[in-house]
Amino acid sequence: MGKKSKHKENAKLPVATIAYYGPDDKTPTKVAVGIIRRFEEAPIALKRWVGADVMRNLAVQKEIAEFIKSHDVKSVVITEGIIGCPHEEGIDFPTGQDCPFCPYWKGKQ
């Protein structure tokens, strides 16, 4: 196994990961929250919220807090800003192509 990252050394499990997505780097329209019980394993739970401004929507933030609490999360890791397009490759557009709905992310993901 490789070296543990500093984040892994400091994170207590289970950990929640929070990532924001949008059509550009300024407009959050999707948030995904994953719950991880063990590093190097897939999340045991994953939930997504979509809306005009999920980052500031109080109802969405309350649901996220309840989702995290329901899994007895001990630490949270959150992305800095918006990390990509909200559409899903292979579901919303063909695998291996850029999203046709979000020209801002063309060639960046």
Image (cartoon, rainbow, N blue to C red):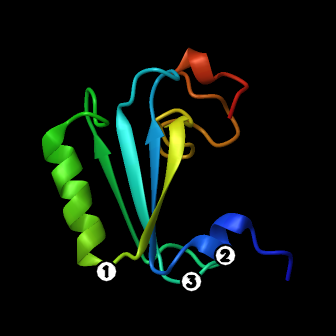
Task: Name the element at disc 2.
Answer: helix
- Residue 72: numbered disc: 1
Q: Name the spot of residue 53 as percent of width and height, x first.
A: 28, 29
Q: Secondary structure at mark 3?
A: loop
- In the picture, the disc for residue 9 is 2
Q: Quadrant of the C terminus?
A: top right
Say which quadrant the N terminus sits in: bottom right
> Which image quadrant is residue 58 in?
top left
Left/right of residue 106 with respect to residue 56 in the rendered view = right
- Provide residue 65's location: percent of width, then percent of height: 24, 60
Spot the residue most to the top: 103
Q: Earlier in the sequence, mark 2 or mark 3?
A: 2
Q: CA distance from mark 3 to mark 1?
A: 14 Å
* Residue 76 position in % (x across, y down): 44, 63
Label 1's element? Answer: loop
Residue type at numbered disc 2: Glu
Between 10 and 27, the one lying in front of the other is 10
Q: Are marks 2 and 3 in contact (CB under 8 Å)?
A: no
Residue lying at 45% horizontally and 29% vertically, measured from the top left: 22
Q: Which residue is mark 3?
A: 38
